[in-house]
Amino acid sequence: MSGRIVLIIMATSASPNPSGLAAVRAAIALACRDAPRDPAEVTLVVVSKTFPPEVIEPVIAAGQRVFGENRVQEAKTKWPALQAKHPGIALHLIGRLQSNKAKEAVALFDAIHSVDRPSLCEALAKEIARQARAPLLFVEINTGAEAQKAGVLPQDADAFLDRCRAVYGLTISGLMCIPPLEEAPGPHFALTAKIARRNGLKLLSMGMSADFATAIQLGATHVRVGSAVFGARN
């Protein structure tokens, strides 16, 4: 997955609109052209949180094979059966992960976007070794130093990444950030990309519906876009 752009579409209603996939792919292709980036490297990850299998099925039928969830328990209740029915589906966890859910998360997800504290690193390292599974791991950076948000502060990122590797033996593939709503996202994306470069990380999970073009220009490899597949949340 190194160097690939991954678009994350946040599913937000019970009215699936597979044609939305085509529209978003076209938008990413345009953003990649302007960046310039290669649209052939784009992977769509449709975040299907809160929606049942019967709502997700039409999107799978439209060709989508990469999905994301916010909560381990919800994913556990609906995705094993869907994956058995539709081989080749990959799952990403984009929400905060509790340390006591690490066992289930490692078993179920192909990528975890929210590594942010030593206790979680310890739990993930134990389960990765025990299960012989290696999901992609992203360290979440709290670029706005917002007290209500999870994530490692930018000034602590290098030391945290060193600890992930040296103490816990984790392979970290990239960084994730969510800029403050009231601030321009570009500087936050640029800061995250700078931290990634100096730590040898190639994957960047950053950018949502209003700013994914900016994120792509600044090196995003995973872009989280809302309300594009299932419509507005009730």
Image (tube, rainbow, N blue to C red):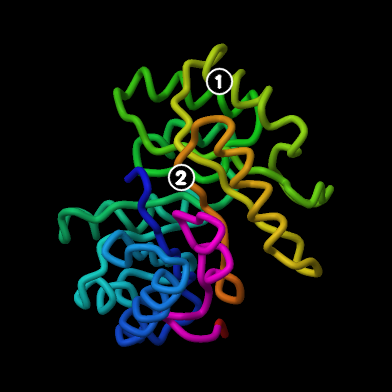
Q: Name above or below for residue 73 compared with residue 120.
A: below
Q: Residue furthest right?
A: 147
Real-space Cα separation, disc 2 to disc 1, in angstroms: 22 Å
Q: Quadrant of the C terminus?
A: bottom right
Q: How far across and how far down the image is residue 4, in percent?
A: 36, 53
Residue 219 highlighted magenta (yes or no): yes
Q: Quadrant of residue 110?
A: top left
At x 43%, y 39%, the residue is 105
- Secondary structure under badge 2? strand
Identify which residue, 87 or 216, lies in the foreground.
Answer: 216
Q: Tell me if 134 is positioned left or right of 152 in this view.
A: left
Tell which residue pokes out farthest to the top in this image.
167
Residue extent of the magenta highlight: 212-232
Amino acid tagged 2: Leu
Residue 151 at x, y = what percent? 69, 42
Q: Quadrant of the N terminus?
A: top left
Residue 198, x across and y down, in percent: 59, 32
Find disc 2 in the rendering and name its residue: 203
Q: Residues within 10 Å of mark 2 (few under 14, many from 20)?
A: many
Q: Residue 25 appears in which quarter of the rendering?
A: bottom left
- Image check: 170 left or right of 215? left
Compared across the picture, whether 155 is left or right of 158 comes to: right
Q: Is residue 86 above or below residue 131?
A: below
**Label 1, on which residue?**
122
**Residue at the image position 48 percent from the left and 68 percent from the top:** 50
Of callouts 2 and 1, which one flags the residue occurring earlier in the amino acid sequence? 1
Asked if residue 122 shows in the view, the reply is: yes
Query: Mark 1 falls on what kind of element?
Result: helix
Please, is residue 1 above or below residue 211 in the view?
A: above
The type of residue carrying mark 1 is: Glu
